[in-house]
Image (cartoon, rainbow, N blue to C red):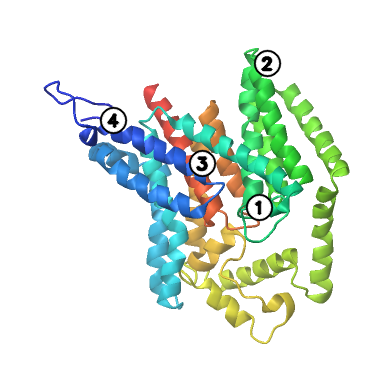
Amino acid sequence: MSVGASTSAGGAALPVWRDPAAWARTADLVVVGIALALPWSTSLVAIFAVIWIIVLAPTLELPTLARSLKQPACMLPIAFFVLAAVGTLWSDAPWGMRIYAISPTAKLLVLPLLLYHFGRSERGLWVFVAFVASCTLLMAMSWIVVFDPQLTIKRQIDYGVPVKNYIDQSQEFALCAVALAYPVVEFFNRRKFALAAVLLALGLGFVVNMMFVVVSRTALVAIPVMLVVFALLHLKWRGRIVALCAIAVLAGGAWLASPRLQAKTASVFSQYDSYEQSNEATSLGLRMEFWRKSLGFFAEAPLFGHGTGSTRGLFEHAAIGKTGAAAEVISNPHNQTLNAAVQWGTLGVVVLYAIWLVHLRLFRRDGMANWVGLLVVVQNIASSLFNSHLFDFHEGWMYVVGVGVAGGIALQARQDE
């Protein structure tokens, strides 16, 4: 029986608890709940994810699922998890550390199920709307916290950041701001100027918050990359030139108007100088130290790496007798490629890049879902230069939900054609 069926073979109505269509609707709403919770809570996201898998089970059509899992977009995330599990066999780390290091890849197992489910669902856009709505509420709360820091939900007061941290908040706002560019252009072309103006104002709201409240350096790198992708894909040559010039002018104006952006930019150079001259453990200096050491670890085991969970032990050994930035110990080198390379060598890097490439190719066509999915992948690739954002909880779930839902819609459209 298909998911859309609501009656038995004899025509009698099925009880709700036996109706696959009712379970499918519930599964859609649970994913909407994940999108709503993602900007606010890690615990709720994990709880909703478990609930979603339970609710999804009655809707599964095993032959169709088996065919879906054979697609590269589904197989490669599973392969990455399997590699992390098998990589425990040649790691020297304690078994507790090895098992713990598998967990960042476990969320990737949800991605194939999302691709399968939203390849049949008609409610995928609900998830995108829910995420933007939740981020809009977070943006409003961010401004409130600016004027009254005591209203923050966090235990520790952080300027303009009511929950989590400024990196996660910047990733959310950047994704929403650029993603809204597509419907703005679409509504404008259809002469629906009121809707275009509303969405444009909302997108600018996210940008203004990042300009004058708080923004991460990672977002400052990712946003221009996403905007260039938008210009190349959705504008003609004349429009691309105008758009790129406008982006440059607006970026310069934003920098001149925002002391916070100036300070954020200047901190890159000051932190680099402090690291180079005195080995000071600045944010940028630590990243450079982590990258330098990680390249050395990769050179020691270039084919299959040191095994799952080995990173911290390698840094501990390298820190013996050192001071300053060189003495810092970490389990995450703050670069997704190096994170994979240290643990699983060239094999891990190949699987990682294959995932990104296959998911990029999934969103080659036009349409809102393809645009959102493409943006999610591009943002993850760009931000993973400075963080392990496929493995981090928040950004990793942004990737899983974004690619899973948008990819399912894209695959459904291809199948319908």
Q: Which mark is residue 36?
A: 3
Q: Which mark is residue 21?
A: 4
User: Which residue type does callout 1 highlight?
Assistant: Thr
User: Which residue type does callout 4 highlight?
Assistant: Ala
User: Contact (CB < 8 A) between labels 3 and 4?
Assistant: no
User: Mark 1 Cα within 10 Å, few/some/many (few <14, many 20+)?
Assistant: many
Of the two numbered discs 3 and 4 on the same chain, state the one appearing first in sequence.
4
User: Mark 4 Cα within 10 Å, few/some/many (few <14, many 20+)?
Assistant: many
Q: CA distance from mark 3 to mark 2?
A: 28 Å
Of the two numbered discs 4 and 2 on the same chain, state the one appearing first in sequence.
4
Residue found 38% across the figure and 47% down from its top: 75
Of the two numbered discs 3 and 2 on the same chain, state the one appearing first in sequence.
3
Residue under label 2 = 193
Q: CA distance from mark 3 to mark 4?
A: 23 Å
Residue under label 1 = 152
Q: Is residue 223 left or right of residue 332?
A: right
Of the two numbered discs 2 and 1 on the same chain, state the one appearing first in sequence.
1
- The kind of secondary structure element at disc 3 is helix
Kindly tell me whether residue 213 is visible in this rendering: yes
Extreme residue in the right direction: 256
Of the two numbered discs 4 and 1 on the same chain, state the one appearing first in sequence.
4
